[in-house]
Image (tube, rainbow, N blue to C red):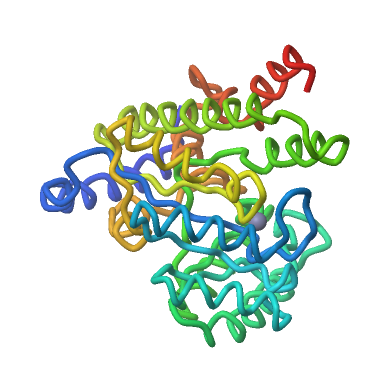
Amino acid sequence: MIPLKNLKLWLFYSSAICIFLVSFSSLVAAQSVAFTFDDGPNLIETPRLNPEQRNAEILKALAKHEVKAALFVTATYGANQAAGLALAKAWGQAGHALGNHTMTHPDLNSASTSLAQYEQEILDCDKIVSTLPGYQKWFRYTYLREGNTTEKRDGMRTFLKQQGYRNAYVSLDTSDWRLDEKLIEVLNKNNDADVTPIKHAYLTHVKQRALAYRLLSQQLQGRDVAQVMLMHHNLINALWLDDVIVMFKEMGWTIVAPATAFADPIYQLMPERAAPGQSLLLSMARSLGLGKFEGWARLVDDGDLEIEALKAHGL
Ligand SMILES: [Zn+2]
């Protein structure tokens, strides 16, 4: 059951969206997706490619397909040092957007993270990102968690508004980080290992999530929303982002700039939940009381099925 208060709120937002719908849908004919990369630039060492090479490979794949994306900066992962700042700058110079993903990646849902601390993390990160070309007042919540208390949730919503920031929602959540962990684990054992099965597992995973979130969008909104996909600044994308882009093109999807996707009115919504977060679409489903709807488990399993299937390849 949907509590009456939530239902009223929902109906208000739904009617507001309908007004925008006709004009917006004429702009976006095919299913579209924008690419966003969190936790970057990341200066950790990985097998096969060093941080500069990983950054260059991701930018090369985007440039090859003329895709404009967004990088969400976690400053202590690299951008607070000259070497990392140069990598972030390369994104802006290539025409990509740069957003804010805190200084140290704290978890707002943790009892040990106060609202004031979290806000300070954003202000400190802003001081760095605001010096870069491509700077946008876009905030991506760490772990996609918007606070475990009403005070934090509403406090952040007020804070972002006061600062002129938008919540840079994700609609299409992937567990690229999990498959990246697996890839690094395998290569750390043997740098010459055949990791082709991991590439196929990654592509299978992204496609499954894309189709599932498209279906959820149709169920919730009666239309294809402009999807915003979450990936990370990591080795798996340095190696195979080109394949991901080719796959979306073969699926008939159009890859749009993040600013284009964020113009979809769905990204103005603020789901009425006690502890909102995750994909906006999943959060909406839960706000509506859908709970464990058909297929929900595959949206939150962190790629378990694909990881399990790799065992058949001895990985
Ligand atoms: Zn993150």
The residue positioned farthest toward the top in the image shown: 312
The residue positioned farthest toward the front in the image shown: 192
Percent of width and height locating residue 302? 66, 32
Percent of width and height locating residue 298? 57, 23
Q: Nearer the viewer, residue 289 or 237?
A: 237
The residue positioned farthest toward the right in the image shown: 189
Residue 292, relative to residue 39: is it above or below? above
Ligand 1, what quadrant?
Answer: bottom right
Q: Nearer the viewer, residue 255 or 238?
A: 238
Residue 233, relative to residue 305: is it above or below? below
Q: Nearer the viewer, residue 57 or 139?
A: 57
Percent of width and height locating residue 17? 23, 49
Residue at 73 percent of width and 37 percent of height: 183
Quadrant into which the C terminus falls:
top right
Indicate left or right for 223 with 213 as reference.
Answer: left
Residue 83, relative to residue 179: is it above or below? below
Residue at 33 percent of width and 57 percent of height: 66
The quarter of the picture where residue 45 lies is bottom right
Percent of width and height locating residue 203? 52, 31
The quarter of the picture where residue 111 lies is bottom right
Indicate left or right for 36 with 119 as reference.
Answer: left
Q: Nearer the viewer, residue 146 or 92?
A: 92
